[in-house]
Image: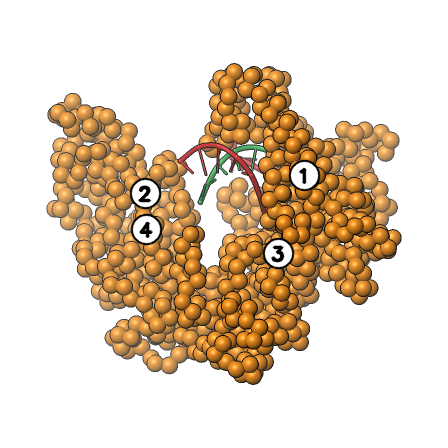
Chain colours: A orange, B green, C red
Amino acid sequence: MDKWVLIDGNSIIYRAFFAMPPLTNSSGLHTNAVYGFTTMLLKLLEEEKPTHMLVAFDAGKTTFRHEGYAEYKGGREKTPSELSEQFPVLKELLRSFGIAQYELPGYEADDIIGTLSRLADEGGVETVVVSGDKDMLQLASDHVTIALTRKGVTDVERYDPAGIQERYGLTPLQIIDLKGLMGDTSDNIPGIPGVGEKTALKLLHEFGSVEGVLANTSEIKGKMKEKVEEHQESAIMSKKLATIYREVPLENKADELVYNGYDEVTLGDMFRKLEFKSLIERLQLPEAGGADANALAVATYEVVTASGLTADALTELLATSESFYIEAIGDNPHQARFIGLAVTSGERVVVVTYDELMDAKISAPVRKWLQDAQAPKKGYDLHKAELVLSWLGVELRGTTFDALLAAYLLDPTESSQTLAALIQRHGLATIQTDESVYGKGAKFQVPASEVLAGHLAAKADAVRRLVPMLTEELETGHMSKLCYELEQPLAVVLAGMEKQGIKVNASVLEDLGAELEKNISQYMSDIYMHAGMEFNINSPKQLGEVLFEKLGLPAWKKTKTGYSTDAEVLEKLEPYHEIVKLILLYRQLAKLQSTYVEGLLKEIRRDTGKVHTFYRQTIAATGRLSSQFPNLQNIPIRLEEGRRIRKAFVPSEPGWTILAADYSQIELRVLAHISGDEKMKTAFIEDTDIHTKTAMDVFGVTADQVDANMRRQAKAVNFGIVYGISDFGLSNNLNIARKDAAKFIEQYFEVFQGVRAYMDNIVAQARADGFVTTLLERRRYLPEIKASNFNLRSFAERTAMNTPIQGTAADIIKLAMVNMDKEIRDRGLRSRMLLQVHDELVFEVPAEELELMKTLVPEVMEGALKLDVPLKADVSFGDNWYEAK
DNA sequence: CTCCTCACG
DNA sequence: ACGTACGTGAGGAGT
């Protein structure tokens, strides 16, 4: 006979946290909630002898309940960090127990348990639901009993339908009505004010349900009648919120709940880490560590400080160390605050604080080690580390492995690549959260030196343990070369570009800003005049009210929160009212003013007159870079007004020139190569205008018959192809009927049959492998390609088509950057590479190198990777970025 | 902190 | 039938 035990993880861990006195292990990790939870688990295992077991967790911040009622669970106290740091520990503990755990974005633990208990009930399986939440009583049935915590953690009271009848005089489903009437302060569910348990029960005993009560208000007396009538809607909504959703998509999850008992060695290691000595004894778990002992063992290293060692001892320790970690707080590496670093040999970790690093006497051996190209170093986020150190006058050299880059390559879509997340994914001993060590926001402070040293040492040690695991995973995924020969060298090149920065002429921006200011205020007063009132044009909400309510313009597109007022909508509205054009113009200028003039001015360094962007190498799922603080990859160019911003980007040395080179049609060339489509390859080999050529073939005309409109449409089709085309997307873009768009696409595929075959194949391949790759074996997983949900699946299919193209283009320009950097160094050039904008590189060049760079840059870019079609790069130059066109 | 809007490739 | 083009970052409003 099967026996299921379903545990509401969030509810029980909260219960345990508040029921148990504070408890920490020797490394400062809070363990009281995990301890309480463990005792609960042991009791359940002993008493219930379950065949299946599951701990369900809430996932994400919002659920479907927030859609109807945004204030759901509002007003809750934030989870204390002493508790939140125990969540990952609990999850690790459950793995050690061999107990299944589950969470699903958008649903709460209740809903998961509700669904599984329904399945169990339908199958006639005896089931116990464990929670601290009375709501769960609604799940009780002939086969499902509810164990509610009473006091402490292990003291529970069991309810079956008869027990609920006895206690409340209600059926399980009436529990929902009970809450609908009385509400629940902890979830911020209102119910009917003034109705508590007593009144609610009285009402339910008389009328049966919320609906029954509302239908019979005439029979209620006095003040209560008013209250009920006044809060009818609240009662109905509250009932809805209290209803556990029992149809969560849990396809065949039941099989995964099987519980086969725990492995004594694994559990023993976990308990040792948590220092649950009494439990080890109680369960008589084995002493020695198992196979995973290394991964799970408590700190086996000794922590020393730089000032506690002689220079010789320090040098000797560093000579046998490779793994290190640099702590700097702040997202912008150019301004991040260096806190300290830790270097580990395995047995010993030396910690160097900011003050110690700044003390030349103490830090000389450390500085020497960091700058020694011959001393191999493995770390985490070395790109940031290199920048932080370089602003402190230390040049980081000799880096051989970056755990962050490796993790990114292994799964670029993983939402968190923090060291803590890597540690957790690899089953290593959990370390304290940064928040618990430093606090956050205004409360940030560097803790006492021993605490800080312990934390940094734990991180360096985590890096040391991660390196061999990541190295092997890279090898398995055929990405070692990509990592060591492309991404890691690129990180060094990027750091150099960022540190160098690009000069921005503030007075150019200020003049432009003054001009914009004049025009913006003119537009503002014109808009107010047409509207007949003043309002905040920047507020989509207020603007929507003015346009669609006051002026009565037709609204056809909505956003989640109201009317859409985006450019697409406004362009359609232009004929209806003069104000619309003015708003569009206002928006255009306001964007330039706030984001580009004011935004950029704020980023200029007083001392150098330069801006220093930071390229993020581990963000984009396709392998592209992204740029931050400021973003220099979205400086206006399409419209002349905005393009003028580029006049502010100038060389940093007198007499020098800005030189820009961009790849021509790189994505379509990549597509021609990987699809092998003969027609497309020929077009590029003969260097014809690809959009004109596409128009000729799709419309079946000669070159001189292709008019501007045909070329425009062909260009849109080509873009669509790269994005993973759909008739809907193309019709939207070209503003044509969907049928016509479908016809275009069909005609395109008739002509470019190799492209059609590629699109079909890559989707099939993604479905078979679960991932797609670029030419350099960069990988992106697409689990949703098998989703039954049409939208999710379609999105994954388009991604499967697009990622190899966009990603290979990214690979190519990255290769070009590494090669170009080497050329500049090998040839001893003074020219500097400054920016990358996906298919463009920007340099500043002294006069005497201009002629050379005009040929060298395109040569290197075109030669970055050998394809079946030529790569082409166009060069331009001028006194500023605007002129380099 | 999320949403909307808009800048780029 | 479903309802989208692929990839980013930043500013302002309103919660």
Task: Please rate how many residues cluster around mark 1, counting C-alpha atoms within 10 Å: few if below 14, some from 14 to 19, many from 20.
Answer: many
Establish if A363 lies above or below A138: below
Q: Residue A151: name its quadrant.
A: bottom left
Disc nearer the start of the sequence (2/3): 2
Please name the residue that numbered disc 4 is placed on. A113
- Same subunit, labels 1 and 2: the answer reads yes
Q: What residue type is labelled 2?
A: Gly
Residue A862 x/y as whole percent:
80, 54
Chain to which the residue tagged by mark 2 belongs: A
What separation in Å lies between label 1 and label 2 (alpha carbons)? 45 Å
Q: Tell which circle, 3 or 1, labels the residue nearer the N-terminal end.
A: 1
Circle 1 chain: A
Per the model, the C-alpha gap separating discs 3 and 1 is: 29 Å
Is A214 on the left-hand or right-hand side of A855?
left
Q: Which mark is residue A617?
A: 3
Q: Do the residues labelled 2 and 3 touch (CB within 8 Å)?
A: no
Label 2 vs label 4: CA separation? 25 Å
Q: How many labels does the image show?
A: 4
Q: Which chain letter matches label 3?
A: A
Query: Depth-wise, is mark 3 or mark 1 nearer the camera?
Result: 1
Sequence-earlier tag: 4 or 3:
4
Discs 4, 1: same chain:
yes
Q: What element carries label 2?
A: loop
Q: Which mark sits nearer the N-terminus, 1 or 2? A: 2
The residue to which callout 2 is attached is A75
Please give left or right for residue A313 compared with residue A155 in the image.
Answer: right
Q: Name the mark on residue A733.
A: none
